[in-house]
Amino acid sequence: MNRFDRVTAILIQLQTKRIVKAQELAEKHNVSLRTIYRDIRTLENAGVPIGSEAGIGYFLDKGYQLPPVMFSLEEASALLVGEKFMKQLNESSTLGTYTSALDKIKAVLSSHDKDYIDRLNTSIDVFTRPQAMNKDSGEEWLGDCKHALSYSTVIKIAYFTNYRETMTERTIEPIGLYHYSHHWHMIAWCRMRKDYRDFRLDRIKSLALQTEHFSRYNRQSLDEYLASVNRSAELHQVRVRFRRDVAKYLGDQRYYFGLVSEQQSEQGVDMEFLTPSLEYFARWILSYTDAVEVIHPPELNKLMQDLSEELVRHFGLPAGDQI
């Protein structure tokens, strides 16, 4: 990106948030802080009213706005592809808002570019394996959760804990929404547990925004929370060998179970995984019976033996047969 494009991009970014940190700008454009300081001075010399607070960041003076920015054809195309992925979330409110925004973008394109986007729309699609969706997916709480995150609002919820099969009243301070394993999760400080907790939205039975607000400076950001979870998660290193005629059918499954590397050997295809649960991993590879061999760790091999014995006990063997 040349300097003119970068300075223009910085001006646009300053309009997207109330305060933008210099470090954030430097990381986004892959330049040094000194370069960002020079670019900010360039904008100031051009008459752009930029304010700053030491140690906090830059901001545009209130009342300053640029005319609507025209989207490039490539940007509009990228948003169109994003809409295709958004449809796979099966969340009507989010998709509806996204589609509405995309329509406004299409409205300012030239006739030629509109025709291009229309042709692209019928030539691109995205498919993911359909998921069984609960009637109550938790989508009804998304609006209130977004409001609480934006205004640091305390929330009161009635939450059903699945593994205990109990309902509890919680007062929480939300720090982020996180979508994984096909569900939305609210990450929040729970006043009852005095710690951060992960609340799946479809298990919230009632939710009420409170008039009380909390200080975000006393809480982790979502990124900080996720980083701490990743650091504390114990991952087991696993090495297994699949028969060649079976390995080619593993497809994307191997990535879901934490594939790190794979290589051909004389005996088959050796694969290395990192997994948080040896038992979960064992139950997966058990389905490949004699087409998979455990190389490491010994505990996994013992698990495979135990699970195999459970299967025999459950289904039984013909009289006279032995394992």
Image (cartoon, rainbow, N blue to C red):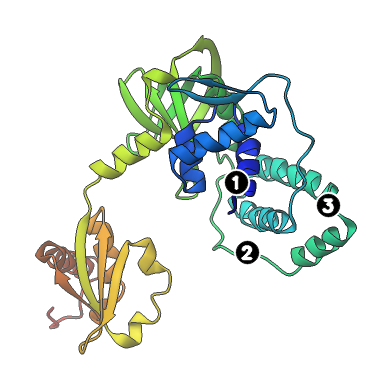
> Is residue 323 among what the camera can see?
yes
The answer to which image quadrant residue 75 occupies is: bottom right
Q: Give above or below for 123 relative to 322.
A: above
Residue at the spot 70% in from the left edge and 27% down from the top edge = 47
Disc 2 versus disc 3: nearer the observer:
3
Mark sitting earlier along the chain (1/3): 1
Q: Which residue is mark 2?
A: 126
The answer to which image quadrant residue 267 occupies is: bottom left
- Residue extending farthest top: 211
x and y, in percent, of residue 144 in the image: 59, 26
Residue at the spot 60% in from the left edge and 46% down from the top edge = 6
Mark sitting earlier along the chain (2/3): 3
x and y, in percent, of residue 275 in the image: 26, 57
Q: Which residue is mark 3?
A: 109
Left or right: 7 as drawn, with respect to 77: left
Residue at the spot 73% in from the left edge and 20% down from the top edge = 63
Q: Which residue is mark 1?
A: 6
x and y, in percent, of residue 247 in the image: 34, 80
Residue at the spot 14% in from the left edge and 68% down from the top edge = 296
